[in-house]
Image: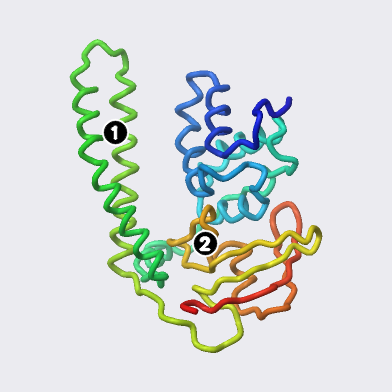
Amino acid sequence: MENTFEHDPTLAEVAHSFLSSLPQEQISEVQAEVLKFVRWLGSSRQVKDITPLDVASYGEQTVPSGVKPVKSFLVYIRKNGFTGASLAPHLRARKPSSKAGISWHATRRGATLTAQGYAELESELASLRGQLPEIVGQMQKAAADKDFKENAPLAAAREQKAHLEGRIRELESTLNLAKIMGKSQGASKVKTGDAVVISELSSGKELSYVLVDPREANPAKGKLSIASPLGKVILNKEKGQTIEVAAPAGTFCYRIESIVKAGE
């Protein structure tokens, strides 16, 4: 199959095409996870720009139940010629901790955010709080429709409300415990909050990132989580060093071209 778009499509456009291609009864099974993946990478990002490491990084913050729907989407992307890269093999969910309570303590540990990141999370929280009354109104309207068999609109509104409330609680917890990082001091090694430019040795392609706490990560804005495969190996490296990143389907090599310390 071939790319039928007359331009380089965005993730959002291809996600819509993918969901439209599914039987109606399958859409509800995969839609939430696919749209979550699209939001995380950036809905306006062109599919051709998605890298295996983007996919591997997403796997670090997802759960096993979310892998299958997203892999199906990635296979669709490849089969329809939206990208020349085989991305699905790079998606693996993080391994659950064998020690009870670790994940709870991790969520209670305060994040160290950039000032811009803190402001963006505050803005997102305000926006989500503003959406709740509309969702409640949709639920009330759907509940009043006695003729709608199985009441799918009510189920969809409830699911959206639960998703919003979960994200609101997550943001509230993050902001309540967060510290805002100050200006990096002198050291030449990459630290959280620093901006880096790296080049892929095989292609010469340059990539720019700001290293941030996982709760501030936003690939669409070039904010790379320090917990991601690439973020982990960049931390504490210096300009000119070569790094290797092991992903599920291979190893990628980069050189650190420049470092701009946080606050400079």
Where's residue 112, x and y in %?
A: 41, 72
Q: Residue at x 68, y 51 (%)?
A: 52
96 relative position to 122: left or right: right
Residue placed most toward the observer, 191 or 148: 191
Q: Residue at x 70, y 36 (%)?
A: 78
Is mark 1 in CB contact (under 8 Å) with mark 2?
Answer: no
Q: Residue at x 33, y 36 (%)?
A: 160
Name the secondary structure under disc 1: helix
> Label 2: how many residues lie within 10 Å, few (<14), some (14-19) or many (20+)?
many
What type is the residue that disc 1 sits on? Arg
Looking at marks 1 and 2 on the same chain, the residue that comes earlier in the sequence is marked by 1
Where's residue 21, x and y in %?
A: 57, 22
Which mark lies nearer to you, 1 or 2?
2
Q: Residue at x 25, y 35 (%)?
A: 135
Where's residue 211, x and y in %?
A: 53, 68
Q: Quadrant of the N terminus?
A: top right
Quadrant in the rendering for residue 84: top right
Quadrant in the rendering for residue 215: bottom left
Would you place residue 243 above or below residue 143 in this image? below
167 relative position to 186: left or right: left
> Label 1: how many residues lie within 10 Å, few (<14), some (14-19) or many (20+)?
some
Would you place residue 11 above or below residue 100 in this image? above
179 relative position to 247: left or right: left
User: Which residue is outermost to the top?
Assistant: 147
**Residue linked to disc 1:** 158
17 relative position to 184: left or right: right
Residue placed most toward the observer, 145 or 206: 206
**Residue linked to disc 2:** 223
Where's residue 194, x and y in %?
A: 53, 74
What type is the residue that disc 2 sits on? Lys
Q: Which mark is residue 37?
A: none
